[in-house]
Amino acid sequence: MAVQPALGFAGLLRQLRAEAGLTQEELAEAAGLSPRSVSDLERGINRTARKDTALLLSGALGLAEPASALFVAAALGRVPAAEVLTAVRESRPRPTVTMPQVWNIPARNPGFTGRDDLLAEVREQLLAGDKAVVQALHGMGGVGKTQLAAEYAHRFAASYGLAWWINAEQGGLIGDQVAALGLALGCVQPEAGTEAVRVAVLAELRHRGRWLLVFDNAEDPADVAPWLPGGGGHVLITSRQRGWEEVAAPVEVDVLARAESVAILQARVAVLSGTGADKLAAELGDLPLAIAQAAGFMADTGMRADEFLVLLRTRAGQLLAQAVPGSYPRSLAAATGLMADRLAGQDPAAAELASVCAFLAPEPIPESLFTGAAGVLPRQLAARAGDPLAWRQTLAHLTRQSLARIDHRGLQMHRLTQAILRDRLPPAQAAATRNHAEALLAASNPGDPPNPVTWPAWAALTPHVLAADLAATGNPALRELARYTCWYLIERGDPRTAHQLASGLHRQWCDRLGQDHEHTLIAAHYRAWTLQEMGRHTESRDLNQDTLARRRRVLGHDHPDTLYTAHNLAIDLRKLGDVQAARDLDQDTLERHRRVLGQDHPATLRALGELAHDLRALGEVQAARDLNQDTLERRRRVLGPDHPDTLRSAGFLAFDLRELGEIQAARDLNHNTLDRRRRVLGHDHPDTLNSAHNLAIDLRALGEVEAARDLDQDTLDRRRRVLGHDHPDTLASAANLATDLRELGEADDAP
């Protein structure tokens, strides 16, 4: 689930206006501004306001010092809006709130924190009239819908003549609670029947106006619809279910903003540091009930944050059954279990879907994973996934229970919901469900990681691959998927994540499968490759040498995997200065690639490019140029002009052209390659930064030193962020920039 953004000035202004009981038009008139100006500020179109505008708004809102000065500072972007909201409230004289005479709202939670932006939005929508006078607050269990409704009722109590709370979880009991309201209003007799109560109370409410009804934890719109009065009052409905559009304006309640989660944890657990609270909030997914339970449990038991995190990762179901806050009816574990049991009774296939989702990542799960590999799913779910109409019904049942949400990106389940669902499964069923999830991932391999066309599919799949228990899996296809995932991450320019994955798999597969197992050697190969991409060439060389020897012995000298490792070892040798050894190995690898895979195979073309590198390093620049020209033409024909490998050849050729004195031609080719790489790979991809680096050298050689300086500065900033300050490429950019600055007479500014 997405972490909610912190309160901004737009939300602050909406909240303060709502608390003042003003419409946008009334605030604009009081401040002497146009309604459009106020609207633009509240919608965030204008993220900050001028000082004079802020002063006018402060006066119209009746803010006193020092709150007024803080409000102006927030308008200028100098003070966090949440901090200002607290100060504004504390600076106000606290009027005695006259509570409605008819009132049964639950006691206010004194620990309620945050949600100011959402409360302001609800208030504004209710004041807008029409259908919006009925708001349905929906979301997963534990997200704080009931707390939000109660806080709204207390915060705006003075705006209502009566406020009545109805527990709507059992639709058949709504009538009795409305009858109690009728008795309090004096409009029904104790012996009146349900229909007489309904008619009398609804008529009384329509006549009165300025009332608030809250239907809490409603299950079905059909249960609530007959009890909606219309007229001049407001209705809040809280529900885990979706599908309220015909009777209410739906408002999705999501998790807390991280700052709100941290504030709650630190308020309850005094010894908890900001860093510790942030880590804990992240693991809890900022879910309000989980945050409250964690804070209560740690405060009651004295448990440290690191101990709690260990238990959360290993025994989430048991842990989240503890320390139920008094402001919630049940624990998160109990609430999730109740929804899961209801779903299983209603639609067993949807329950199977929930269980499979529990073994994937808490990021969006593309629907195509299920519909494209229905045959590997549990029996009932497989039948549904293969039928478009039945599949939609299954999704509706799952999301209606708020165990997951769905949007254009796919299904998404909160990490704690996943943990609780996993813990509820008996061991045999958990193992079977995990196997189904692994088979689903393996069957969804997009393939061809070097091809950017596949990258959107890889981007959606990768979080779920990383969430799988890859080290322990017995599924060879899932191990192959891990291999392709490492490859994708490297091609996409994220060697650090690939290194974490490959290193962990290499260590664990060495112990579990043996050092010479094919999958252990795959992990070793990608571990070495990531070291190479991170500039750690000595470590990469040593691991590549060991892996090459093992692959030659286990797979043979001509196996493609053996040749891939030889290819990478040659790169390390050249980077470490052993150029002749690199050339000899690259020449041998190229001949084997040609014999095994053919002249135009992408791996053969990569070997050609590396051999050209060696030739240039040995001073045979014309031979390198000819080889790179031929490779570029082949790659354009085989792979297309924008394939990353094609652009790599273009970069190599531009390097040769500069070395041969054809600087303008090198500049033109580097400029074209940079434009293509920015479009295909993005501005921060290491290959894109290589093109920028080389183009800056061309610009300086052509006398365009200021342009070179600007490009080198940008490249250095990006390389520091992407590769780190000590990466060889980052250091090369720093040296280039220093040269530019010296030529411009700005040596004192050199990095």
Image: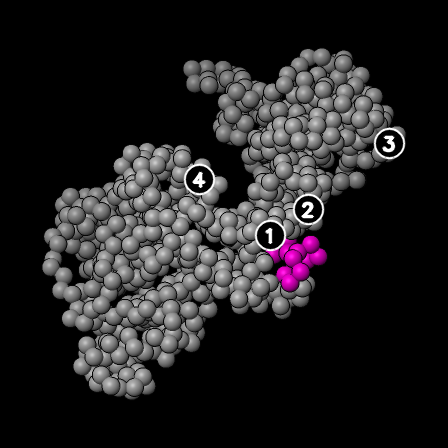
Disc 3 designates what residue? 596
554 relative to 45 in the view: left or right? right
Query: How much space separates mark 4 and mark 3, taking CA atoms?
Result: 53 Å
Q: In which quarter of the image is residue 548?
A: top right
The residue sitting at 28% across, 46% down in the picture is 82
Specify which label sits upstream in the sequence, 1 or 2.
Answer: 1
Disc 1 designates what residue? 429
Residue 575 in picture, x, y percent from top left: 67, 17
The residue sitting at 49% across, 18% down in the picture is 741
Specify which label sits upstream in the sequence, 4 or 2.
Answer: 4
Specify which label sits upstream in the sequence, 3 or 1.
Answer: 1
Residue 159 appears anywhere in the view: yes
Residues in magenta, as a range: 363-382
Front of the two marks 3 and 2 = 2
Residue 442 circle label? 2
377 in magenta: yes
Q: Foreground: 727 or 474?
A: 474
Mark 4 residue element: helix
Specify which label sits upstream in the sequence, 3 or 2.
Answer: 2
Q: In this view, does 10 lie above or below 345?
A: above
Front of the two marks 4 and 3 = 4
